Each structure stands twice: as C-alpha cells, then as structure tokens.
Amino acid sequence: MREYAASAFASQFANGGEFDYFYVALTDEEKDEFLRIGSSYLFLVKQGDWHVDVEGSNPVIGYFTNSFKLVSLFSLIESLSSEKHQDFYEWLAHIHERIYPITDNVELKRLHEKYKATFGSIRRCVAFFHRLPQARQVELRNSLKIDGVPVKSIKEVAQFLYNLRSKFVHEGEFVLDIAHVPVISRHKNASTVTELSMPTLLSAFEEGVVAYFRNAT
C-alpha cells in the first residue's frame, strides 16, 4: 500500500526521498491511516473513473464520473476525523438544553445550524479546507463567484462543494459545476460562476491530506 500512497501524493513531494522522510516521521497509527487514505483515493478518485457500457455512449461521461469522485473525496475527508457520525435527531435527543416542543421552523433551523456547527459533517470538511496554504485558499475562493464576486472565505467554498455532493447523494442531481470550462448556474436564487476543474480540486485534496498528517506529527 505504501507505493499506492506514494503514487497518490507524488505531486506533494519533490522526489521519493522526500516522501520517505515524511512517511517515516509518522506514528504507526498515522502510517496506517495515511496508507488507507492514499490507496482509497488512488483507486476511487485519482485513477478511478465511473464507466458505463451503453451502446452509443462514451465509456466515461465527465459529469457522471465527477459526481462520484466528489462523493468519494468528501467521504475520505470526513473519515480523517476521529469523530463518529451522529444523526441530527440522535443529537437532539442528547443535547443538554430544553428544546421540546419545537414550535416552528425558525427554531428547528436554529437547532440544525447548531448541530452543523458542533457535530455535523460540514464542520469536519471546513476544517480540512482551512488547513490548505493561503495561496490555495485564494485560488479556490476566486474559482467561485456569487453574483460576480469571489466568495470571501474558504468555508463558503467547502459548503458549496459539500452541497453539490449532497444534492447528488440525496436527490440524484449530477455535479455539473465542476468542469474544464466555466459553469454558470443558480444556487439559492444567486447567480454562480464556477471555474473549478476536477484536477484543481484533486490537487487541493492532496495538499490538504499531506497538511493534515504534517500537523498530526
């Protein structure tokens, strides 16, 4: 599995010796986790495409494979956290405040926002993007413009990408915003221009994983 991880994250190291220096500095537990992430990423995403076998169709359709790749990326990001997933309603049952009865949608929304901020998957994903170098964060922010203006924080980029992932997982809505050309769309009644390709997103992921394990040592 070590060779798979080395191949997956080759872009982050000047040579094999630099990779070896990084790898041997990890604890045994961190090595196992790094190899798991690296091999899964290599096969599921970096060198993996969703293939179709339909007469008259291309074997690889860009927005098909990008949809599955985005889901895999966020699954790997979430798996880096030691926190286990907890359902929103399970969380409601265990919080130490009087919440029932929930009288209206405003109160329900407040509780859901608190859940996302304290335990939701999006919090782990935002933390991952915050570890990226500032130059990468600026590049990602500039790749996402809402009503013609680049978003102000990397958190907004993480939330936007996570929402694309969720739309596909829960509603079967393919990920069209990540492409090799700029994409204009509407999200939450705002005009959105996305200039983010899958190769750029993969580079950011690789950078983020290495940053995560460097900070862990």
Image (tube, rainbow, N blue to C red):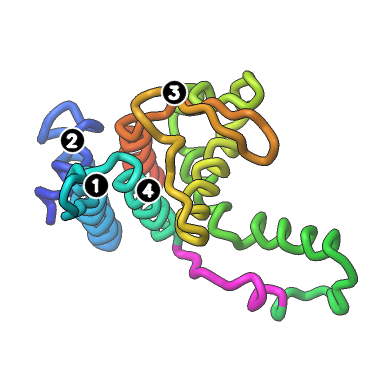
Residue type at tag 4: Ser
Residue type at tag 1: Ala
Task: Measure the C-alpha gap from mark 2 to mark 4.
Answer: 24 Å
**Residue 10 marker:** 2
* Closer to the eye: label 2 or 1: 2
Task: Measure the C-alpha gap from mark 3 to mark 1.
Answer: 41 Å
What residue is disc 1 on?
A: 25
Q: Is residue 103 magenta?
A: no
Task: Measure the C-alpha gap from mark 3 to mark 2.
Answer: 28 Å
In primary-sequence order, the first of circles 2 and 1 is: 2
Q: Do the residues labelled 3 and 2 touch (CB within 8 Å)?
A: no
In primary-sequence order, the first of circles 3 and 2 is: 2
What residue is disc 3 on?
A: 182
Residue located at (54% from left, 25% from top): 193
What residue is disc 4 on?
A: 67
188, 98: nearer the viewer: 188
Residue type at tag 2: Ala
Question: Which element type, helix, strand or loop, lies under badge 1?
Answer: loop
Residue 64: percent from left, percent from top = 32, 47
Classify residue 94 as left or right of residue 163. right
